[in-house]
Amino acid sequence: MLPHSYELPAAILLVLGGALSCFAGYRLFKIVLGIYGFILGALLASSMMGVTNTTGMIVAALVGGICGALLLMFAYFIGIALVGAGLGALVAHVGWGYAGTGDPPALVVILLSVFGSIGAMLLQRYVIIVATAFGGAWTVIVGTLAISGDRGAARAATAGDVWVLYPLTPAPGKGWVPIAWVVLGLIGTGVQLGITGKKK
């Protein structure tokens, strides 16, 4: 959660970080881990603060973000496994949301997260490229929708003048979002395999 006045700067950072991840994630993997660690840490820490405590939310977001960034940057192999698990969880949520309603069953999320972790460790280079391309594409879409003013998922929280980031469901009822995610993810994968992620 962040105050609404911070929505635009946060959304711009999401788009820039997502683009970096999507098109150069393998080459800059430690930086990408730091960016996503910061985002996740900030989301978790700021959500523990009350909606009326603006200063507390900002401080918690910064401290949580720094801790999350350091954790993922220093835990490289754990970070790779977490990227695979995160990609598996993202696929479960997007696939389930596109095919059905509500959240996927916990067992589906857990199984896809475990398979994602195992795959990430066995095929590190390719999994890192695909995970950063698709994770970055999704982050670009979430940030772009926030910049464009689409607050459909966050309307329930606006009464307290707080912006709540919904990273797995940025635009309920919009069937084009998963298609745009797949197309942008494939473009990012192609760019990384062909240009930025080539072995030296």
Image: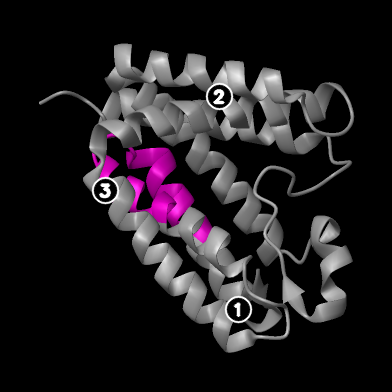
**Mark 1 belongs to which amino acid?**
Tyr
Q: Of discs 1 and 2, which sits in the foreground?
A: 2
Question: Which of the two residues, 192 or 81, is positioned nearer the viewer here?
Answer: 81
First in residue order: circle 1 vs circle 2: 1
Question: How far apart in space, not on screen, are marks 1 and 2 (Cα)?
Answer: 30 Å
> Which disc is residue 73 wearing?
3
Distance between the Cα atoms at labels 2 and 3? Answer: 20 Å
Q: Amino acid at mark 3?
A: Met
Q: Is residue 135 positioned above or below 92 on the image?
A: below
On the rendered structure, is 64 left or right of 9? left
Is disc 3 in contact with disc 1, using a CB cutoff of under 8 Å?
no
- In the rendered structure, the answer to whether residue 132 lies left or right of residue 172 reads left
Circle 1 sits in a helix, a strand or a loop, which is it?
Answer: helix
Q: Is residue 135 left or right of residue 67?
A: right
Q: Give the percent coordinates (x, y) of residue 55.
A: 56, 88
- Residue range in magenta is 14-37
| Residue ID at (24%, 37%) | 76
Can you identify the residue that label 2 sits on? Answer: 88
Q: Are marks 2 and 3 in contact (CB under 8 Å)?
A: no
Q: What x and y, as percent, mark residue 194?
A: 30, 24
Location of residue 146 by image quarter: bottom right
Please name whichever residue, 84 or 151, is drawn nearer the observer in this view of the structure.
84
Residue position marked by numbered label 1 in the rendering: 6
* Residue 151 visible here: yes
